[in-house]
Amino acid sequence: MINLLPPKQKKEVEKEIIFRKILAIFSFHFLCVLLLLFFFGYLSGFLSGKAKQAQADLALQQERLAQAKMDDYRSETAKLNNYLANLDIFWKRRIAANVVFKDVFPLLSDSFSFSGIGFRLTSKTLKASPTASSSVAFFAETNFDGVALSREALYELKKALESQKKFSDVYFAPSSWSKPKNSPFSFKLNFSLGI
């Protein structure tokens, strides 16, 4: 291209071209900085959202772990309380009535009325085999006296008691079967205390 401008204007045109090039370079750099700021802002928001989600998941996991530990503590406490109650039964030779009642009373119908209930702690030595060491099992020997409306209800009770694994040596006195209606009865059973 032929430039026919005077030298003074030539210098101004050259300055204007240099200014435009510098302005284009700065505009490009400004645009890159804006894009980088936008990218880093988006990345920061994304990472902080992930961090908050991770914190929430961690808090939930810690809560579940704490709940599991609390459940373990509760079950261990219940086992220890049961063991201590059984140890108290053994040591003081006293039996809490609710231990036997909670298993016997659901088997009873309205056909029975009781006049007496008695407990006594007994033990048996159990030996699994001739070479094994023997262990001692404790039982609550329980006596029940009362009146049954019918002999059939008494028989049903006998079958129900014998079907329970916690009860052993279920024995009804022969006089319990003498009357078909309003029969006085007496029976005893051994209730395993699990100590």
Image: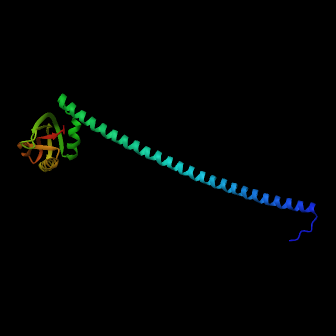
Q: Residue at x 94, y 64 (%)?
A: 6
Residue that extends furthest to the top in the rendered view of this protein: 92
Residue 46 as seen in the image, left or right of residue 147: right
State the image coordinates of residue 170 (x, y, percent, origin top left): 11, 44
> In front: 173, or 97?
97
> In front: 87, or 21?
21
Q: Residue at x 79, y 60 (%)?
A: 21
State the image coordinates of residue 191 (x, y, percent, origin top left): 16, 40
* Picture quarter with the N terminus: bottom right
User: Residue 193's quadrant in the figure?
Assistant: top left
State the image coordinates of residue 182 (x, y, percent, origin top left): 13, 44
User: Residue 140's quadrant in the figure?
Assistant: top left
Asked whether the viewer can see residue 35, the reply is yes
Q: Is residue 175 above or below residue 15?
A: above
Q: Residue at x 90, y 63 (%)?
A: 10
Asked whether the viewer can see residue 109, the reply is no
* Picture quarter with the C terminus: top left
Residue 49 as seen in the image, left or right of residue 152: right
